[in-house]
Image (spheres, helix red, strand yellow):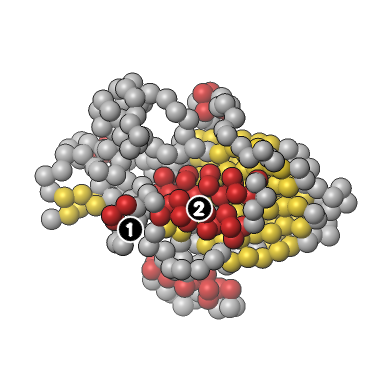
Amino acid sequence: MTAACPSCAAPTVDGDHYCESCGADLAAPAEQFTLQPSAGPLSPPVEAFVEPAPPPSASTGEWRSSKAAAGPCAACGATAGADGYCDGCGLRRDAGSEHAEHDLPGVVAVTDRGLRKRRNEDAYAIGVAGGLRAVVVCDGVSSAPDSDAAATTAAVEAIEVLVGGGDITGAYRSASVAVAKLAGSAAAYDAPACTFLAAVVEDGQCTVGWVGDSRAYWLDGDGARCLTVDDSLAGQLTAAGVDADALRLSAQAAALTRWLGADAPAGDPHLTTLRPTTAGVLLLTSDGLTRYPTWTDAIDGDGDAAELVRRLTNFARAAGAADNIAVAAVPFDPSRGAPQP
């Protein structure tokens, strides 16, 4: 008989003492896995803001990501093995950071675990190369194993391609190959998976590519305009002008029809290009923010991009933060010819 792990929802089998996916103690009381919500503002520990050593970067640019920094096991202090599990106690090491913030000239991003999930399965990567600004946001599929590893791997792989001069389709293909390798023998039926959302801002235009339900928005004086269409039945109906809410569809209508992973449907990402004529902000976000219909109320025309992504993250936390959150922003002013820091 199988049951879901109370920590990460991965399948377990009677007799298992620890979850094979996250390493949680399955004999622990159920209440151990319940995180109490708080409406308070985001107050991550000081060490969450310590900038790690710059990661390897392409010769033409630099990048940062929310990938967890190397270090000893948080539970016992031993070294984590190459397989991602602690050599001392067997605890699985998370691929992403519980909270991370990074900024480079003209681009900024934040991710946060939220208040309900045991680990952060959202990931981002941002990069710059000359006049180019690139962003990748990935959201691990919660029903898939090792979804944090999938999201982090995809974001890092894609940003390396983008700052190296590649396009979004090439970045998606490279990320797909890297994530597929995480599946091993489980590729056909239970593979790590995530959404994929990437943007490149260069030469006066914004190009966005996506697979899944992470979204990109153009924010300006007229409000927030969604640039993407969710890969789900509900998303497709909404894009066609149908009031999906009025149809009272089941929750399965929001299930992904496309994702990134070894068992994903074939095909390249959707692409759209925007050439703004007014100043604004290109915003990329996981559904940890957009699940709350009033999230646009937290948009304020004053302040810089760093304040914007932090304010949106705080809004999601105040709303309950039932999911992980990842938000990235690229301010853009066509009169200046390049995104502004």
Is disc 1 surrounded by few (<14), some (14 to 19) or many (20+) residues within 10 Å? some
Mark 1 residue type: Ala
* Distance Cα–Cα, label 2 vs label 1: 15 Å
Residue 292 in view in this figure: no
* Residue 41, numbered circle: none
Q: Position of residue 67 (x, y in %)?
A: 49, 37
Q: Residue at x 22, y 36 (%)?
A: 25
Q: Nearer the viewer, residue 58 or 290?
A: 58
Q: Nearer the viewer, residue 87 or 229?
A: 87
- Residue sticking out furthest to the front: 59
Q: Residue at x 52, y 28 (%)?
A: 48
* Residue identifier under label 2: 175
> Circle 2 — which element?
helix
Q: Position of residue 62 (x, y in %)?
A: 65, 37
Q: Nearer the viewer, residue 249 or 192?
A: 192
* Residue identifier under label 1: 187
Q: Position of residue 190 (x, y in %)?
A: 31, 58
> Circle 1 — which element?
loop
Q: Which one is earlier in the sequence, the residue at label 2 or at label 1?
A: 2
Q: Nearer the viewer, residue 9 or 127?
A: 127
Q: Position of residue 40 (x, y in %)?
A: 51, 35
Mark 2 residue type: Ala
